[in-house]
């Protein structure tokens, strides 16, 4: 389908852009931009008067599998540290996941993402009792909504060698199956250094090399990851990953809360992506990531929270304001934009700017501003005024998937009714595991 978006105000958070021009879209791409473009045959005109168009947002580190955890009861004795949070909550949840609950987690998470204007999810999946085929199930759920995804399975030694190997195989099969998919790609996934032996890291390194890919892994999220590495391997986390071929420009390190200055330098030099997850770090009380030291290849993730990047950015901004690593005002917007740089490199296509030749992933915003809005004060509006309720319509790859706040082709109410039943069964299985 071809579209001509007329009378639109284009905005981009970073670098800040605020211009009026029309946008012509053919198939999956933006093919022309300019003033007063004329309608061509076969084109549908969308009048965007009074509305704003911005590029789709990217959630650069998340776990769709936690979508059905909302509201579940916590352990009888509350966890006292990060490891206990994993052991008592998240590892109980992931062990209870089956095909149906993985699918519904993906579907619910994808529906929410699109309503927040998030068009791509970089997911980190775990379901130790349903490993083989789990990434395909997640993909099917996301495809039903129309989102883009970069998926991987969290390889770990936690469940023994057989499950570790199943995790490695799941990553490899998904990478192979999606090498040319315009909407999905696979990465080599790994949980974290502290749940992986040298042999496992070596195997992950081999996969990364074999497919010229990157690893997606939690790094220094909590002090426990750092101390485990120093005690058991007599080296720092980044050196351990580097020695196994896992420090490269295609890799994604999530969190980096407890990285040293020297380690951050090594990450910057290798051009490895670092993902800041402010809400999750605060919730797990793991500490504040030294954002002022992170390099330009830093993006934002929600780490399992719903993919509302407006909310993540705001909370990230306010947390930074009171931190000892206070950084420039534009920093969070830069990080949000970097998500589009990540997917541009992975898909080898252009994302993140409304311009000719770029992929047509975009969001129409209905924002009624009570004060003047310009290129200069756009970020002020973003932090102190805008939120995801202004997302009106969303296009991914030239196709509308949210129109006037309705997810197209999906009976959202029916999905939520079914998801509640699936969540109830999931919580019951979890209770049995405790
Ligand atoms: Zn995570």
Image: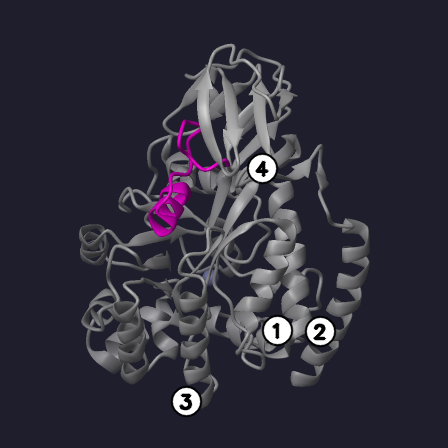
Label 3 Cα crowd, 10 Å radius (few <14 / some 14-19 / many 20+) = few
- Foreground: disc 2 or disc 4: 4
Q: Earlier in the sequence, mark 3 or mark 1?
A: 1
Residue 23 in view of the camera? yes
Q: Give the residue at mark 2.
A: 426
- Foreground: disc 4 or disc 1: 4
Q: Earlier in the sequence, mark 2 or mark 1?
A: 1
Q: Estimate the spatial distance between the alpha carbons at disc 2 and disc 1, rounded to whole Å.
A: 8 Å
Task: Quadrant for the C terminus, please.
Answer: bottom right
- Foreground: disc 3 or disc 2: 3
Residue at left offset 34%, top offset 73%: 193
Q: Pointer 2 and pointer 1: residues touching (CB < 8 Å)?
A: yes
Q: Earlier in the sequence, mark 2 or mark 4?
A: 4
Q: Position of residue 24 (x, y in %)?
A: 51, 24
Q: Estimate the spatial distance between the alpha carbons at disc 3 and disc 2, rounded to whole Å.
A: 26 Å
Whether 145 is drawn above or below 334: the answer is below
Q: Give the residue at mark 1.
A: 93
Instruction: Tell me if residue 351 is in the magenta stretch.
Output: yes
Q: Position of residue 391 (x, y in %)?
A: 63, 33
């Amino acid at each position: 389908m071809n579209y001509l978006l007329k009378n639109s105000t284009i905005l981009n958070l970073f670098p800040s852009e605020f211009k009026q021009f029309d946008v012509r879209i053919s198939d999956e791409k933006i093919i022309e931009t300019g003033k007063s473009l004329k309608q061509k045959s076969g084109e549908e005109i969308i009048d965007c008067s009074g509305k704003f168009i911005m590029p789709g947002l990217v959630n650069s580190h998340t776990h769709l599998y936690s979508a059905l955890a909302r509201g579940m009861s916590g352990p009888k004795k509350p966890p006292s540290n990060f490891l206990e949070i994993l052991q008592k909550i998240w590892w109980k949840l992931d062990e209870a996941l089956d095909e149906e609950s993985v699918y519904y987690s993906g579907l619910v998470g994808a529906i929410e993402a699109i309503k927040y204007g998030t068009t791509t999810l970089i997911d980190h999946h775990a379901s130790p009792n349903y490993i083989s085929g789990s990434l395909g199930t997640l993909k099917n759920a996301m495809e039903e909504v129309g989102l883009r995804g970069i998926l991987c399975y969290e390889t770990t030694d936690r469940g023994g060698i057989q499950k570790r190997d199943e995790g490695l195989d799941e990553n490899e099969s998904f990478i192979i199956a999606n090498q040319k998919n315009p909407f999905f790609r696979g990465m080599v996934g790994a949980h974290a250094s502290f749940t992986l032996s040298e042999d496992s890291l070596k195997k992950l390194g081999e996969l990364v090399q074999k497919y010229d890919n990157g690893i997606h892994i939690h790094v220094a999220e909590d002090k426990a990851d750092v101390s485990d590495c120093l005690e058991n391997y007599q080296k720092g986390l980044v050196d351990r990953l580097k020695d196994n071929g896992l420090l490269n420009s295609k890799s994604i390190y999530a969190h980096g809360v407890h990285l040293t200055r020297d380690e951050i330098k090594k990450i910057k030099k290798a051009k490895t992506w670092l993902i800041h997850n402010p809400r999750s770090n605060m919730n797990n009380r793991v500490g504040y990531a030294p954002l002022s030291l992170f390099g330009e290849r830093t993006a934002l993730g929600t780490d399992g929270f719903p993919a509302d990047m407006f909310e993540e950015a705001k909370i990230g901004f306010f947390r930074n304001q009171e931190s000892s690593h206070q950084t420039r005002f534009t920093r969070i917007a830069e990080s949000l934009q970097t998500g589009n740089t990540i997917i541009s490199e992975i898909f080898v296509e252009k994302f993140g700017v409304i311009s000719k030749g770029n992929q047509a992933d975009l969001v129409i915003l209905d924002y009624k501003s009570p004060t003047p809005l310009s290129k200069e004060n756009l970020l002020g509006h973003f932090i102190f005024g805008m939120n995801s309720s202004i997302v009106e319509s969303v296009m991914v790859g030239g196709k509308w998937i949210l129109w006037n706040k309705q997810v197209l082709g999906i009976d959202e109410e029916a999905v939520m009714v079914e998801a509640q039943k699936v969540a109830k069964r999931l919580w019951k299985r979890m209770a049995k595991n405790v």
